Amino acid sequence: MSRIVFLEDRCKGCRLCIDACPAGVIRPSGRFNHQGYEVMTSGEGCTGCASCAVMCPDTAIRVFRTARTAEGGRA
Amino acid sequence: MSDAPERILIKGNEAVAFGAVDAGCRCYFGYPITPQNEIPEAMSRLLPEIGGCYVQAESEVGAASMLLGACASGVPSMTSSSGCGISLMQEALSYMTGSMLPAVLVNMARGGPGLGDIGPSQGDYFQAVKGGGHGDHRNIVLAPATAQECYDFMFRAFALAFTYANPVMVLGDAVVGQIKEPVRRTPPPDALAPERLAELAAPWRVEGRGRRGPGAAPRLVKSVYLAEGTLAARNRQLRDKYEAMRAEARWIAQDTDDADLVVVAYGSIARAVRSAIRALRAQGAAVGLFRPITLYPFPDEGLRALAAARPGRRFLVVEQNLGQMVEDVRLALFGPAGRGAEVLFHGLMPGLLADAQTLEEPVRLALAGKEIRS
Amino acid sequence: MNNPCNALPEALRPREGESLVFDAPAAQVDRPTHYCPGCHHGIAHRLVAEVLDELDATDRAVLVASVGCSAFSYDYFAVDALEAQHGRACAVATGVRRANPDSVVFTYQGDGDMAAIGLAESVHAANRGELITAIFINNTVYGMTGGQTAPTTLIGQITTTSPAGRRLRGEGGPLRMTELMAGLDGVAYAERCALDSVRHVRAAKKALRNAFEVQIRGLGFGFVELLSGCPTNWHMTPQAANRRIAEEMIPVFPLGTAKNLLDK
């Protein structure tokens, strides 16, 4: 499964990533960073499409994609 | 170049263009305005021939902004204008001082205020010397009187601009710009080679960081300092620089040893005064001339030395305005280091060629401590 | 790689079978921005940085900054940069590019800077066909000074200086810069994009790339207008700001390529 990593100290809690995610896997985490912004978290089902990162105004998301064949092979 | 320097008959404005190009200027940005149009016209021919760039801007605001960009790139560059156009350049001039850029601006002054006229005037003294732009900006001001000086002073302007990383203005007027005189097209002794100018710009110019090798840190040229204490630090740096510039004060004193009266005049007016003084000395009058070459820094010490050398000596300031440089003369003689002297003023109206004969009377009267108004 | 982003902790390194498909571009400085949450400047900055890297232009690039919220844009680009007076960026960029013909020069300006105080400098640089790329952020307000009326403010839009809503008579209509630029002979590329959706952001990157390519290939002035959100001065959430772009701005500022000399 692909995954995203939030650079939490960069997040400003704008939530544009939530709207951008076609799989609907991003949600607010209930945790706040040192700037006082609520940071996001992601659940299962990420496809690695990077839409969230494309929309993030703070370049706070990194996207790691797992190739489908490798995913199948390991399952 | 041959051993016998070529002498060419050109206008002061053309001499500015030749001097600039020979001094290494490679970019010119300007906007037409009388009485300096021969400068952009000459530059539009000269610069493309040597791989330089000439841009006729949409306004003097645009021209001065382009100058800022070219100067930040470390390339010897200039603009020229007159009166109203120089007013429009004050914004960029202040930014260039704040950003510590080696801009060269030429003002072939015309009459004002407002649209005024297109004849000679020295009404832009305050604007040039005290600055029309905002903030604590200062720029060196050179005042040529002849076409030869127009040529020579462009070398000095670029040398000073790059040495101090600060704008330099060359302040002439309609007479200086329009008069046609023989000019020797050879670099003066105080010229800096274009390679030296490039060396002086190498530590700060923006150029694309890759030009400085792989992994070079980006550079930034700016005048904004918002964080607490940073503008104070920057302005201390500027203050130190302005103080160092004082060493660049230049003047010419002629026939002053025995003079009971020293006439202080600059630019084209100094030439007319010089002729009047010659005539008066032939009649036995003890009169001399003090001509500031730099209007900023003002040659305070030269004036004070003249006052100290002969207590009771009078000074007459002759300007083609309502009285501007006279304030700096009084400041020099009455300020902290001065011991005072009688300072008289004779102001010529703009738009007319200064006539040596009509200047004889105010000088003669000043010998007796009297002023007359033109 | 020069980007300090690449000196990453364990969680940010690809694991076996993974590839990093989204990373910060090297031309972008790895630091938090001063922009408000949801402000689109950050997206625009990143897109420009990505394009500079992809065109191998970062080492030759010179940024001419403007005055407004993006006054400190140079803090976020790992390129040589200089400050221009308010509105004068295209004139300053003209000077840089003329003095240094090997450089890749771009301006980054807001709507007040480019379309109001700097309209003359912008239009004339474009008309001269200066080999520069101008990035124009249109968010219909003056952001830095607190949300006053801009030349791009929509009719009826309430701002701090149009409390009754902008009126056509007396206050003018929203200035359409892309159409204006496309009408000039010196412009080689002009496109209006929006940053309100993933699809639009990806299109904006292509447009930015084209606007730099026309400069690098010597074809003329490159121009990209980016319809951007200003949640703070629009007094709405970032998500609502994106909806406003789609529902209110795009109908007034239609998206698309208005001029493209790349294929000619």
Image (tube, coloured by chain):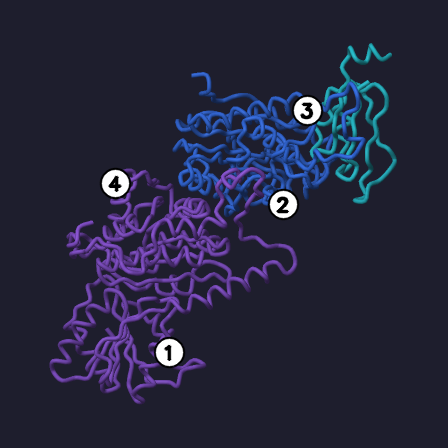
Chain colours: A cyan, B purple, C blue
Looking at the image, is B213 positioned above or below residue B286? above
Q: Name the residue nearer the viewer: B15 or C251.
A: B15
Residues at discs 3 and 1 both on one chain: no
Badge 2: how crowded within 10 Å, few (<14), some, or many (20+)? Answer: some
Cα gap from disc 1 to disc 4, whole angstroms: 44 Å
In the rendered image, is residue B111 in sight?
A: no
Left or right: residue C154 compared with residue B150: right
Q: Callout 2, which amino acid?
A: Met
- Circle 1 sits in a helix, a strand or a loop, which is it? helix
The subunit letter for the residue under badge 1 reads B
Query: Between tags 3 and 4, which lies in front?
Result: 4
In the rendered image, residue C3, in percent from the top left (x then y), is placed at 65, 35
Residue corresponding to mark 3: C197
In the rendered image, residue B60, in percent from the top left (x then y), is placed at 38, 47
The subunit letter for the residue under badge 3 reads C
Residue B286, image quadrant: bottom left
Q: Tell me the residue at 33%/51% (across/down).
A: B80
Residue corresponding to mark 2: C144
Looking at the image, is B322 positioned above or below residue B144? below
Q: Callout 1, which amino acid?
A: Arg
Residue corresponding to mark 4: B45
Cα gap from disc 1 to disc 2, whole angstroms: 46 Å
Cα gap from disc 3 to disc 2, whole angstroms: 24 Å
The subunit letter for the residue under badge 4 reads B
The image's mark for residue B330 is: 1
Q: Do the residues labelled 1 and 4 touch (CB within 8 Å)?
A: no
Marked residue nearer the N-terminal end (1 or 4) = 4
Q: Do the residues labelled 3 and 1 touch (CB within 8 Å)?
A: no
Q: Callout 4, which amino acid?
A: Arg
Cα gap from disc 3 to disc 1, whole angstroms: 68 Å
